[in-house]
Image: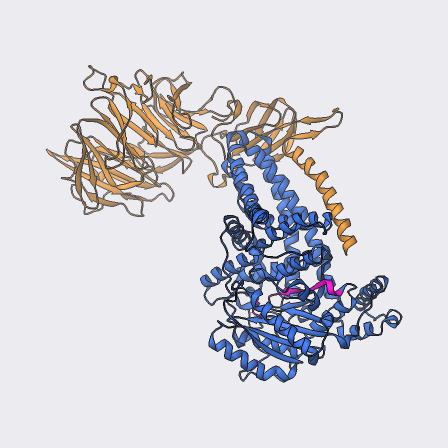
Amino acid sequence: MRALRNIAFVLFTTAYLVVCPLVLLYAFGYSVRPGEPAIVKTGLIYLSTMPPGATVHVERRRYTGATPTILRGLLPGAYDVRIGLAGYQPWSRTVPVEPEKSTVLNHILLLPLEWKPSWLLPGPLQSVRQIPGTRFLLIQRGSTLRDHVLYEWKTGRVQPLAGRHAAWPDAEVTAFWSVSDSPAVLIRLERGEDARFLWFDVSGDEPRMEDLTGLIPAGARRITWDPLDRRHLFILHEGRLMRLHLPSRTLALIEDAVRGAGTVDRTLYLLESTGALLQADPDGAGAHLLANDPVWAEPIGEGRKPVELWAPAKGRVLLRGARGELYSPRPPSLLIEDGIEGLAWDPHRERALVWQRHRVGMVTWSEPPTRRPELRWLFEDGRNITQAAWVYEGSHILLHDADRVKLLELAGAERPVIHDLFGLADDSAMAYVEGAGRLFYIDPSDGALWAVEVLPRREQLSFVFPEWDETNMGQDQ
Amino acid sequence: MMFRYSAAGLRGRDRVLQRVFSVLPGLTSWSILIGMVALAFWKPLLAATLVIAFNLYWLLRLLFMTVFLILSYLRLDVERETDWMARVRRVDRRRAALEDAADPADMRGRLSSWLFRGALARLRAADGQAPASDSIRHLVIIPIMKEGRSVTEPGLVSLTRQTFPADRVLVVLALEERAPEQVKADVRMLQARYRSAFLDLLVIVHPDGLPGEARVKGANATYAAKAAAAKLTELRISFARVVASCFDADTVVGPQYLACLTEAFLLCPDRTRASFQPIPVYHNNIWEVPAFARVLDIGSSFFQLIESTDPEQLVTFSSHSMSFEALVKTGYWPVDMISDDSAIFWKAFIHFDGRYRVVPLPVTVSMDVTAAGSWWKSIADVYRQKRRWAWGVENFPVVMRAFATSATIPLSSRVRHGLKLFGNNVSWATWGFLLTFIGWLPALLVSREFSDSVLYYSAPRITTTIFSLASLSLLITIALSLYLLPKWPVRWPSLRKIGHALEWLFIPIISTVFSALPALDAQTRLMLGRNLEFRVSEKRRGARARPAVDARGTLEPDGELELAVDVRRRA
């Protein structure tokens, strides 16, 4: 047994000494090629498409695997990669490969050869909007409370927002508040001189309504809440920031002389009239100065009133002025001079989409966010951009530009690639729901609710590896 | 070599060496674990490279161990029909034994016979003289602290059922003075009932708190061994003709155990410089304990099976036997160390200047799996038991101190044993964490440096391949466990039996929580100079596990011990 053990020991040790270096060389992308004088360094391309199962051609050769797949052992250089799938438009790019590096194209969205809208609800409908973090769309048939219904996009079920016994069914809905990742909405009703505030929690099967009339000042316009804490509402009214505790229905003053407020991840951001931007606990305690810019102080001058504080994530704060200016807490604070139409947050890669009538840009933060965020314009040929949304985990941007719906593909090329998808009247309301992978819109011709599938076969979405937010060479940004 | 095998009362250089070597295993283990976590954060490429290299090493080591697990199992299987007393008688015939060995008809018998003739030839080649078997006496010491009759009696009964004549067996029940009164009463009852079956059955009460002693099993066993020495002297029995076995109270041996031990003792050329190690299995209550405890102890048995193929570096573990002369000359078991089973080997190894070894026995002894009634209490008890096993690391500083100062133990032997002792302890505390958790960190943390690399995409493929190959080893282990274990209870449905086979799938978690973690705990305590308190593991057996002894405490008519499980139970 001893001799056998010694022989086995020698064999296994030899095997390890031979196999281990070879495996490590393979792991790093080293390869032995016929005709090559020595071991060569290679790189790889990772391809993942939606829908999966597409064929891959590299240069002129058909690759045997289907997406998602890894093209290994590629010598450094640029490769023409073409992807095809029956029923979808071909996709092709020139992809650079570096030694020992991976080029990751993991959000390739294949566009159908023909868009097939599906009819969902009869008209006439006025607007559609997503209730973030839920499976519901809020559909507006008219201006009264009775005219507001919830459409469950998973099942197609329609139900009234307020139950049959709700007060003021004929009152006009004059304001609507929602917060990203929060399954709740707050609406304001008006009947004559009177106003009511109704809070709807739609996290369950049936919406749960709570009447907050009398707790919220009738003229309040700035109301927000933390997606992680639906028990508290923050109300900014006439310079007073108050916190409403819903279970006890008590209102507490946080601070006077406030111009803007935002809350996220149990952190409160508030802009004082002096121009000081503070970060505090939700109850206002522990406040400390983040930035202080005289340009934010009140009064400044006509038309320069930066009052909307946008805090989509902890440490990510932007200030939006009345003329559509965009400010950062880090100097120099002015990012965009005017004309901001909207902002959208990409939770996957922690960056903001910003759009004006004619262009779309992206605001990115350093990690940690100690430097001024950077603005990069992605598309500047818009005609009249009214809505925009992140698509496919931030790899694409959907635009409603005048009477067209366009898709901006960020991955796979140095400059974003624009795809013209289909026509949609410029006064048509639309809402893109990432969870459903569908774009819902109201067709002005008949006022009906329609949907187009943007992310096909969503249920087959698969990721082999955890992803990094940006890859090298600007392919996937 | 004159050496005081203890960590207590050291001064000067010895104290410094002891401290340094106490810190070394824990420091190394923590450095590896923290270092790998830190690398995963800051140098993920390097971390992933090391993980691949380590996983490959682990795979080859696993395959290597699997090969020898199979061989060791086959060795056990080959001897399952062996009549060891017949062998003993053949050894008695000495010269004729080599020639008169007519090969049995079956392959297993022929192999067994071939192995026997080889051992006999080696004895002759070493010019060794085997003493007459009728001059051999067995001393069996059973330390008892809180084990009641239900735990102790089956082992005693198994000793009465030996093929080796019981009237040549001296049994000593080593009872702690601080044992509960019920346990003391049980021991007295057992003495009255079984004394006549043996050469003698002594009950030696170990006084509590003797100077220089800790509350450890070794102190009790040593006290009993000294009393036994006096008894043997009184009986004019030479210590060189006595084989001492120290059994845990729950140890149950097969009928052939003492015969097998006698044969090994007779055939061992330098028998008074050797310990004899059976394969410990934990079958007494194997089907009545939680799955994690069962998997762990089967794993322990398998580890011993593998270790038994390497007699050069085998160390005594749990229930073991040795020359009584060696035990006396060595100065008995350490009285202030918890890991008396392995400590006695090292003590003897150092005392005899490295000319001491462990002879593996192709026979099993069965013990209880720790079980404490409730599931959660069992978890705590199993954890403490494994930590106590891992506390064997306390031997490392003592052994290394001896190695560092010894001029008589060959350098190669010191290096080989030192490295193995160190490596075993460090791997024990780290491998589980590395394989189950830390090895995945580079992929989970996904830094940009890593995600941009080819390695990021190659590593999962390589790791998957490695673990797929490793599953071969797992399948073999499951298959062997099914052969080695006692039969399932008949009343069990098939689904439950399948479930028991699938228990092995939890081995990564189980081995981390109940093997690596206790080992790291033990090493950390040693590193920080905190001692471990000896706690007797709780053993419980259900009604099904006591079929050999009826309610009145008498043997069943067939006298077959269900508890004495060896490989034949599966056959």
The image quarter containing residue A120 is top left
Say if residue B558 shows up in the picture: no
Give the percent coordinates (x, y) of residue B149: 53, 77
The extreme front residue here reads B12
Residue B20 locus on image (x, y percent): 57, 45
Residue B483 percent coordinates (x, y): 66, 64
Residue range corresponding to the magenta coloring? B271-286
Farthest residue, direction left: A193
Quadrant where the N terminus of chain B sits is bottom right
Number of numbered labels in the structure image:
0
Against A41, is B232 above or below?
A: below
Residue A409 vs B229, above or below: the answer is: above
- On the question of residue B441 being in view, the answer is yes
- Asked if residue B282 is among those painted magenta in the image, a careful observer would answer yes
In the rendered image of this protein, which colour is used for chain A? orange
**Chain depicted in blue:** B
Position of residue A180 in the picture relative to residue B519 (left or right): left
Residue B389 among magenta residues: no
Where the C terminus of chain B falls, by quadrant? bottom right
Q: Is residue A63 left or right of residue B514?
A: right
x, y percent for residue B444: 51, 39
B112 vs A75: above or below: below
Residue depicted at 42% across the width and 33% down the height: A348
Question: A166 or B445, which lies in front?
Answer: B445
Colouring of the image: by chain
User: Which is nearer the eye, B161 or A214?
Assistant: B161
User: Which residue is more in the foreground, A155 or B515?
Assistant: B515
Front-most of residues A381 and A337: A337
